[in-house]
């Protein structure tokens, strides 16, 4: 049978009208409902997506500024020697890894705004406190606890977005969210350049000013988030949406397999661990995080070794991220349009492969810089594509949350490898680092294509056995979840 993209019902219900408990009546289809949906999505796109994107921008800025701080004198100011800098990078990922799954359980018990806001305040404090460190132990402690608290936003955001958007709308919004990390890379370079060339302080070194300038706004934004970030369609305020828009938001959330009312479902927990799809996506994410962790932390150093001065090297880190922004948005827009994830992941990873081949094969500065741009263009789109793929193909709040937490845990465990492969003794060609990253980008290509093939075959099997896709009511979705069927339901079709 010919493989076709999954066709998802778009805001349609079984009856002509729907009515909530407060008596709000909205049409189930037709121009009036379409107008309500357009207004609702526009409001969410102007409030929820930019807010989450801004949070992740500061998340990435605070995580990656240590690479810029290194060029601004961090190692001398904190008396680092030998492998101390690389070990400090690794400790961040130790903290980040051990809190992935616990944070998903906390998300089921507290509102997203509280979890994200409080953890943001705490990682902002950790980031700012690095300006006061004078030793290796102080730097390691700050990085470790910053890793613990930064898990509040990254894994939680796809879950929050899945409450408000349908499956075919998710990758584009997730791209806008995670695309802010590429803006953070660009802004980080510009800020570091500005600090190095225009700011001087009698008592504070440039690397200390960098941590302070980027850390304090994070704390302020965390406080705002507690009171501003929407938690669910049911909690949307009257000043923000009309009663009709709120009712449609609730219905859309339920039609997107968000009818699960349980707090923590142990069966979903085990289902997530046993699901073969999650094994594939974890392997893809492992293949991504080793080159991604090394790229964000060592790009300033790599650019400087190409022959640029320290201040110019900070500025020259901007263009690779600018290229990545364009690629993230284009790949994820087309992925939503075609409802295909794996092929876009493989295509993105192929760009990164080409970049690493340029870096390995040539000593020419222009070729190396071009290679760095291709690496950025190839790595960054994979993040929102994989995360939206996992959110698309896991039914049930607990199963979806644990699947995303598993993905991040596996990925960040191996991200520590990425912090250890660009040793000073391998400069200026860094054959070991580039070679390891090239190998793991191939891993991404292989497993993304393999998973796409397996899911395509499963969709074809269900089409042949059960016929056309059937729209489930929220009650039928809840029954499927209660019975432990989840995404194995005959009416469910995977995004491939």
Image (spheres, grey):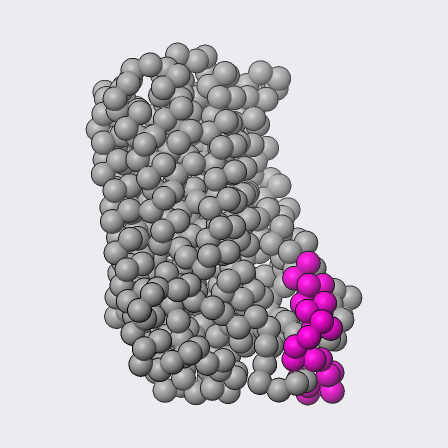
Residue span colored magenta: 18-42
Residue 145: x percent and y percent? 42, 47
Q: Residue at x 25, y 22 (%)?
A: 361
Left or right, 45 with respect to 99, comes to: right
Residue 425: x percent and y percent? 23, 20
Q: Is residue 40 magenta?
A: yes
The image quadrant of residue 10 is: bottom right
Residue 214 vertical placement versus 305 (above, below): below
The image quadrant of residue 392 is: bottom left
**Which of the image's four quarters has the C terminus?**
bottom left
Left or right, 27 with respect to 348, comes to: right
Q: Residue at x 60, y 40 (%)?
A: 216
| Nearer the observer, 354 or 60 | 354
**Which of the image's four quarters has the N terminus?**
bottom left
Q: Is residue 346 magenta?
A: no
Is residue 123 visible in the rendered structure shown here? no
| Nearer the observer, 209 or 251 | 251
Q: Residue at x 39, y 49 (%)?
A: 344
């Amino acid at each position: 049978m010919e493989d076709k993209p999954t066709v998802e019902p778009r805001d349609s219900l079984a009856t002509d009208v729907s009515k909530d408990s407060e008596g709000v009546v909205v049409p189930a289809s037709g121009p009036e409902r379409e107008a309500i949906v357009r207004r609702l999505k526009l409001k969410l796109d102007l409030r929820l997506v930019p807010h989450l994107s801004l949070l992740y921008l500061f998340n990435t800025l605070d995580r990656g500024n240590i690479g810029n701080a290194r060029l601004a004198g961090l190692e001398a100011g904190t008396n680092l020697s030998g492998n101390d800098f690389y070990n400090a990078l690794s400790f961040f990922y130790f903290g980040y890894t051990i809190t992935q799954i616990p944070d998903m359980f906390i998300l089921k018990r507290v509102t997203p705004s509280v979890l994200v806001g409080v953890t943001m305040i705490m990682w902002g404090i950790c980031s700012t406190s690095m300006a006061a460190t004078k030793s290796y132990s102080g730097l390691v402690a700050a990085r470790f606890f910053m890793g613990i608290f930064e898990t509040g936003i990254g894994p939680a955001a796809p879950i929050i977005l899945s409450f408000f958007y349908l499956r075919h709308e998710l990758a584009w919004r997730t791209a806008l969210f995670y695309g802010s990390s590429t803006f953070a890379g660009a802004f980080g370079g510009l800020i570091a350049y500005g600090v190095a060339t225009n700011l001087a302080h009698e008592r504070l070194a440039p690397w200390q000013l960098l941590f302070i300038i980027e850390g304090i706004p994070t704390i302020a934004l965390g406080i705002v988030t507690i009171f501003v970030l929407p938690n669910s369609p049911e909690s949307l305020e009257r000043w923000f949406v009309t009663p009709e828009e709120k009712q449609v938001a609730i219905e859309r959330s339920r039609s997107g397999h968000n009818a699960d009312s349980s707090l923590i479902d142990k069966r979903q927990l085990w289902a997530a661990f046993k699901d073969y799809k999650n094994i594939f996506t974890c392997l893809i994410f492992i293949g991504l995080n080793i080159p991604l962790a090394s790229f964000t932390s060592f790009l300033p150093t790599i650019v400087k070794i190409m022959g640029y001065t320290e201040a110019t090297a900070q500025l020259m880190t901007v263009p690779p991220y600018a290229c990545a922004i364009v690629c993230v948005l284009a790949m994820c827009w087309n992925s939503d349009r075609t409802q295909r994830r794996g092929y876009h992941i493989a295509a993105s990873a192929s760009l990164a492969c080409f970049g690493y081949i340029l870096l390995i094969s040539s000593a020419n500065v222009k070729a190396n810089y071009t290679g760095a741009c291709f690496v950025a263009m190839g790595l960054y789109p994979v993040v929102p594509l994989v995360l939206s793929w996992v959110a698309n193909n896991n039914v049930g709040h607990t199963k979806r949350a644990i699947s995303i937490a598993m993905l991040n845990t596996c990925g960040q465990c191996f991200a520590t490898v990425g912090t250890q492969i660009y040793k000073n003794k391998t400069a200026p060609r860094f054959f070991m680092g580039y070679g390891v990253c090239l190998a793991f980008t191939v891993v991404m290509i292989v497993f993304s294509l393999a998973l796409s093939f397996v899911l395509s075959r499963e969709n074809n099997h269900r089409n042949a056995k059960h016929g056309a896709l059937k729209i489930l009511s929220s009650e039928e979705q809840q029954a499927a979840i209660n019975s432990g069927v989840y995404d194995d339901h005959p009416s469910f079709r995977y995004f491939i």
